[in-house]
Image (spheres, rainbow, N blue to C red):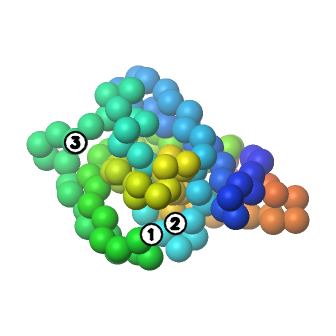
Amino acid sequence: MQIKYIDDLLQTSITIRYKGHNLTIDRLVIDTGAAHTLLSSDIVAQIGIHYENGDRLVRSFGIGGEEYSFRKQIEQVQLGGFIMNNPFIDFGVLHENIDHINGLIGLDILKRGNMIINLHRMEMHPTFSHHD
């Protein structure tokens, strides 16, 4: 899969599936410093993902300070040739000053896919193609 270098950030796309609906999300930062993937709750609302009773609330800390999100199990994440079934993904509102990105791909997905990031070729690929 191709990596884009935009605004000094490595960006790519993923496709998620929730209740039978697929959504491809662009402008996601590949963030090896983030423990968990975080997707914009505004973007995923179009396929019915929103906070519901029983969803876990998550508090995280980063350069931007303290953030709150909710964690929900979805049917599938596809990142290039890597497919992850039934993952728990974090959803929330991103900082106002980073409205040009739709989320972060964190180590929860990058490590499960054992992703190889080739900065010379600006490509990323898993060492295997399917994981449950």
Q: Of callouts 2 and 1, which one flags the residue occurring earlier in the amino acid sequence?
A: 1
Q: Quadrant of residue 52?
A: top left
Answer whether labels 2 and 1 touch (C-beta < 8 Å).
yes
The disc placed on residue 107 is 2
Q: Secondary structure at mark 1?
A: loop
For discs 3 and 1, the disc positioned in front in the rendered view: 3
Q: CA distance from mark 2 to mark 1?
A: 5 Å
| Residue at mark 3 | 51
What distance separates the C-alpha of mark 2 from that of mark 3?
23 Å
* Badge number at residue 35: 1
Badge number at residue 67: none
Q: Amino acid at mark 2?
A: Leu
Q: Which of the pair 104/15 is nearer the observer?
A: 104
Callout 3, which amino acid?
A: Tyr
On the question of residue 129 being in view, the answer is yes
Q: CA distance from mark 3 to mark 1?
A: 21 Å
Say which element carries label 2. helix
